[in-house]
């Protein structure tokens, strides 16, 4: 019987469509492609998610690689945060599950800075019993350690837990904790 429901953030709780984010930031197709390639799809973005680099470290790197000013890059980072918009249907589901007595958690690949911003704006601590942010734990999905850490820290019985993620390879991962998973509709 499912007692615990674990939610990813990007493209599950918050709209995460990188192509649309860059299109809303600039009308230049060249700059859009550059921002996708050299920022959002670059390994340094994963370093942010993993917590091995801080925003203050990557902004100059992003600026140098894209040849955009650091000020423009900071504007882009703020634009990204502003475009992490709540997916109403999922938040309604979270509230419904909470009202029904399910234990709710989050597990997301995200920088600590982004998480703190979202938590402040949306009072996530009032919706969830707890969760893990990769940028704080220095481990990312789909690495098995992050699933094991979640189960251990919150005393979750994997067979009683459901993980909702936008990435089928993550949500259906056969990880050591045998966490059950489903993939939400991909909003990328």
Image: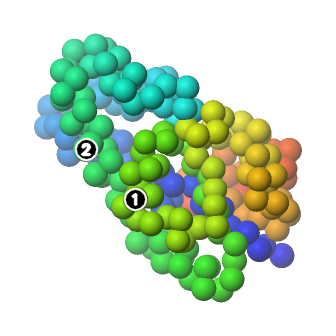
Q: Tell me the residue that label 2 is attached to.
A: 79
Q: Is residue 89 above or below residue 122?
A: below
- In the orientation shown, which residue stands out farthest toward the bottom? 100
Q: Quick one: label 2 or label 1, which is nearer the N terminus?
A: 2
Q: Is residue 58 left or right of residue 142?
A: left
Q: Which mark is nearer the camera, 2 or 1? A: 1
Return the mark for residue 142.
none
**Percent position of residue 137, x then y:** 64, 39
Locate residue 79, reporting x and y percent.
25, 44
Return the residue nearer the eye: 138 or 26: 138
Residue designated by label 1: 120
Crowdedness of circle 1 by 10 Å Cα count: few (<14), some, many (20+)? few
Instruction: Point out residue 80 in the picture as x, y percentages from the top left corner.
Output: 31, 44
Which image quadrant for residue 72?
Answer: top left
Give the residue displayed 39% in from the left and 23% down from the top. 58
Cα–Cα gap, marks 2 and 1 = 17 Å
What kind of element bears circle 2? Answer: helix
Q: Count up the numbered dots.
A: 2
Q: Rate crowding at label 2 as few (under 14), some (14 to 19) or many (20 or more) other CA atoms within 10 Å.
A: some
Q: Is residue 140 above or below residue 60?
A: below
The spot of residue 59 in percent (x, y) is 33, 25
> What color scheme is it?
rainbow
Find out whether the residues at labels 2 and 1 contact each other: C-beta distance under 8 Å: no
* Residue in the picture at 27% in, 42% down: 78
* Left or right for 169, reference 122: right
Q: Looking at the image, which residue is at 83% across and 76% down? A: 1
- Dot 1: what SS? helix
Residue drawn at the location 42% of the way across and 45% of the way down: 114
Q: Is residue 38 visible?
A: no
Look at the image and tell me whether residue 63 can be seen: yes
Asked whether, in this view, residue 48 is left or right of residue 22, the answer is right
């Amino acid at each position: 019987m499912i007692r615990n429901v674990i939610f990813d953030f990007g493209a599950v709780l918050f709209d995460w469509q990188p192509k649309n984010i860059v299109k809303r930031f600039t009308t230049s197709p060249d700059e859009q492609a550059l921002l996708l390639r050299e920022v959002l799809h670059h390994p340094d973005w994963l370093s942010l998610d993993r917590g091995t680099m801080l925003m203050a470290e990557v902004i100059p790197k992003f600026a140098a690689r894209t040849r955009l000013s650091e000020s423009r890059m900071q504007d882009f980072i703020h634009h990204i945060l502003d475009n992490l918009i709540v997916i109403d249907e999922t938040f309604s589901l979270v509230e419904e599950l909470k009202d029904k007595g399910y234990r709710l958690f989050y597990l997301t690949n995200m920088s600590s800075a982004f998480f703190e911003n979202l938590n402040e704006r949306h009072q996530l601590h009032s919706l969830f019993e707890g969760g893990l942010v990769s940028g704080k734990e220095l481990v990312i999905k789909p690495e098995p350690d992050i699933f094991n850490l979640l189960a251990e820290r919150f005393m979750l019985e994997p067979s009683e837990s459901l993980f909702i993620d936008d990435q089928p390879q993550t949500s259906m991962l056969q990880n050591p904790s045998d966490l059950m998973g489903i993939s939400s509709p991909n909003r990328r």
